[in-house]
Image (cartoon, helix red, strand yellow):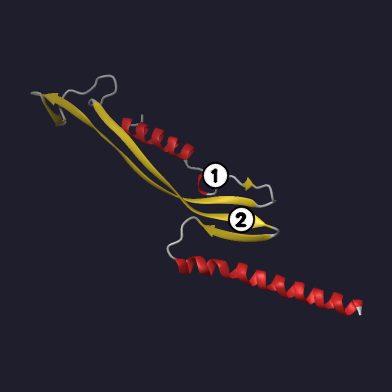
Amino acid sequence: MSHPVENIMRSTMEQLRQMVDVNTIVGAPIATGNGTLILPVSKVSMGFLSGGGEYNMTNEKQTIKKAGDDMDAAEGRYPFAGTAAAGMCLTPMAFVAIENNRTRVLPAQYKGGAERLIDMVPDFIAAIERIIDNANSQEQSGEDAQ
């Protein structure tokens, strides 16, 4: 026979399992109109507290029962009181963007301007490569015309 505090903990853990699943950490994909797929990524922090005890009321004061005191005859236990509490914090951390076979991680928050500049370097390099490719293709089409 399980103790009442075990039942409280089991019930609370089942509820927590239902709240937190893989879709809480990595959210459902969001498709945009231009073919970009966005996946939200979050951090989950949880706290859990559960407790209880068996008590006896004597002289209008609550005291812990001792061996030999009256027990609940039905279960062979003292009267029980208990509770459980849980808290959860969900913090967005980043977004994974997939566009034209290119994957980028976009942080949800920047701590400073330097981080933003570092994240923009790949975009700058890609833009420069496109400019060079366009210039080369224009030169080749100009040479072909002559």
Q: Which mark is residue 109?
A: none
Is there CB contact under 8 Å for labels 1 and 2? no
Instruction: Please name the amino acid that badge 2 sits on.
Output: Ala
Q: Is residue 1 left or right of residue 24?
A: left
Q: Circle 2 is placed at which residue position?
A: 97
Query: How many C-alpha atoms fall within 10 Å of the one at disc 1: few (<14), some, or many (≥20)?
Result: few
Q: Is residue 13 above or below residue 38?
A: above
Secondary structure state at the residue bearing disc 2: strand
Disc 1 designates what residue? Answer: 23
Q: Quadrant of residue 137?
A: bottom right
Q: Nearer the viewer, residue 62 or 16?
A: 16
Q: Is residue 139 above or below residue 126?
A: below
- Residue lying at 91% horizontally and 80% vertically, measured from the top left: 146
Determine whether 125 is above or below 42 in the image.
below
* Residue name at image x 43 percent, y 65 percent: 112
Image coordinates for residue 126, horizontal then vertical, percent: 66, 69
Q: Position of residue 139 (x, y in %)?
A: 81, 78
Distance CA(mark 1)–CA(mark 2): 17 Å
Q: Amino acid at mark 1?
A: Asn
Between residue 126 and residue 86, name the one nearer to us: 126
Looking at the rendered structure, the number of numbered marks drawn on it comes to 2
- Select label 1 or label 2 by which is in front: 2
Disc 1 is placed on an element classified as helix
